[in-house]
Image (cartoon, grey):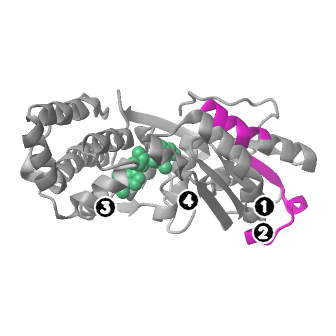
């Protein structure tokens, strides 16, 4: 078997049209076209997202091949995300990838988007050794996973309602900070006082999370102020509220990691997904790992949010494990780990 296959990866599960090429474990190119048309609606509009993927998929794939310096007939396999995600969006990348693999006569590799986020920790060195703990924190998912070699994962905990990124996005809207909310709260919190208000943290058994109570509590807190008082509060204390909300989201994530390191004895920790770009989360995770004598792996910010480099790298690990997919593979919007 070719030890350094050239694999094209495609990611279209939400609102980013992305393609990347790996040669073995080495990333050759990564192109992401983010659809900014959704900002005007305050969230992703599925119908518009799939139409934009249709428009962008060919140029994005062509650019990924060009930046890798490859003709398409040099590819050894084609990979794409098949779930979880928006059905219409997934179908664009998945159908394109299957058709390309069929036309080239090379294997097709379907990739679980969540495995893609996990393997974003393997895009560039230092790469975590197996087994390691992985916190997947994105707009759609919040899970703590024990990652073993050969795609044997154990989900130790997950959110019971909103994902961490979803909490950032929904609360940012309440604070009128715009969309996507995570980067907006991160930025707004820079000079804020996290102790301005103690928003609630859910305390659940094990490693599960819950963030919907926090969102409701911010809503009620704002509603408790009369119109003028609310305007004054938002005018004077947006930074403080952003910092307090950010702290209420980061605390349970860090607490779960602390307990998981102590309980499992695993000293390699990865944090992946869009929320891993959060500066407070990164700083606290660094401090935690330094205190626990653990090593922390957080991908370059470009690979924290959705991208195809993580899909191509996951596909390479699947190739090594002999895991290719049938062309009958269909989109699985509710796929889990
Ligand atoms: O992984 P991702 O690009 O897409 C999903 O698979 O969901 O994650 C997007 C999420 C959004 O909710 C966004 O608000 C959040 O990641 N995010 C952040 C930051 N940057 C992106 N959340 C907090 N702080 C950030 N700096
Ligand atoms: Zn994602």
Seen in the picture, residue 209 relative to 232 is either above or below; the reply is: above
Find numbered disc 1 in the image and state the secondary structure of the residue it sits on: helix
Q: Quadrant of the N terminus?
A: bottom right
Instruction: Tell me the distance, in whole angstroms, between the alpha carbons under discs 1 and 2.
Output: 6 Å
Residue 239 picture quarter: bottom left
Q: Is residue 26 left or right of residue 117?
A: right
Give the residue drawn at x 48%, y 65%: 300
CB under 8 Å between discs 1 and 2? yes
Question: Magenta span has 194?
Answer: no
Ligand 1 within 8 Å of disc 3? The answer is: yes
Disc assigned to residue 279: 3
Say above or below: 240 vs 255. below
Label drawn at residue 62: 1
Q: Residues within 10 Å of mark 3 (few under 14, many from 20)?
A: some
Image position, residue 106 (x, y; %): 87, 48
Q: Nearer the viewer, mark 2 or mark 4?
A: 2
Q: Earlier in the sequence, mark 4 or mark 3?
A: 4
Q: Which residue is mark 2?
A: 66
Image x and y of residue 216, in percent: 22, 30
Residue 122 numbered mark, or none: 4
Picture disc at residue 25 = none
Image location (x, y in percent) of residue 314: 63, 51
Q: Quadrant of residue 278?
A: bottom left
- Distance between mark 2 and mark 4 Cα atoms: 23 Å
| Residue segment shown in magenta | 66-95
């Amino acid at each position: 078997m070719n030890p350094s296959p050239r694999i094209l990866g495609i990611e279209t599960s939400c609102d980013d049209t992305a393609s990347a090429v790996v040669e073995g474990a080495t990333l050759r190119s990564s192109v992401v076209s983010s659809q900014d048309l959704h900002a005007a609606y305050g969230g992703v509009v599925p119908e518009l997202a799939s139409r934009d993927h249709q428009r962008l998929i060919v140029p994005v794939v062509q650019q990924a091949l060009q930046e890798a310096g490859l003709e398409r007939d040099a590819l050894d396999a084609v990979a794409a995300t098949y779930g979880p995600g928006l059905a219409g969006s997934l179908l664009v990348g998945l159908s394109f990838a299957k058709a390309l693999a069929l036309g080239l006569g090379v294997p097709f590799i379907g990739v679980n988007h969540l495995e893609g986020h996990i393997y974003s920790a393997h895009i560039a060195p230092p790469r975590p050794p197996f087994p390691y703990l992985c916190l997947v924190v994105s707009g759609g998912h919040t899970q703590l996973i024990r990652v073993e070699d050969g795609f044997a994962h154990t989900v130790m905990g997950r959110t019971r309602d909103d994902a961490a990124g979803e909490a950032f996005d929904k609360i940012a809207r309440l604070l009128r900070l715009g969309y996507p909310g995570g980067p907006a709260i991160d930025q707004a919190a820079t000079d804020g006082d996290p102790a301005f208000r103690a928003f609630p943290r859910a305390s659940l058994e094990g490693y599960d999370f819950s963030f919907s109570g926090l969102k409701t509590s911010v809503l009620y807190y704002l509603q408790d102020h009369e119109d003028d008082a609310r305007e004054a509060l938002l005018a004077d204390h947006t930074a403080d509220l952003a910092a307090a909300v950010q702290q209420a989201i980061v605390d349970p994530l860090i607490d779960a990691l602390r307990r998981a390191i102590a309980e499992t004895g695993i000293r390699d920790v990865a944090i992946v997904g869009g929320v891993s770009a959060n500066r407070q989360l990164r700083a606290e995770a660094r401090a935690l790992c330094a205190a626990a004598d653990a090593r922390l792996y957080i991908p370059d910010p470009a690979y924290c949010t959705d991208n195809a480099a993580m899909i191509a790298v996951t596909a390479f690990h699947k190739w090594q494990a002999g895991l290719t997919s049938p062309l009958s593979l269909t989109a699985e919007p509710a796929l889990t780990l």
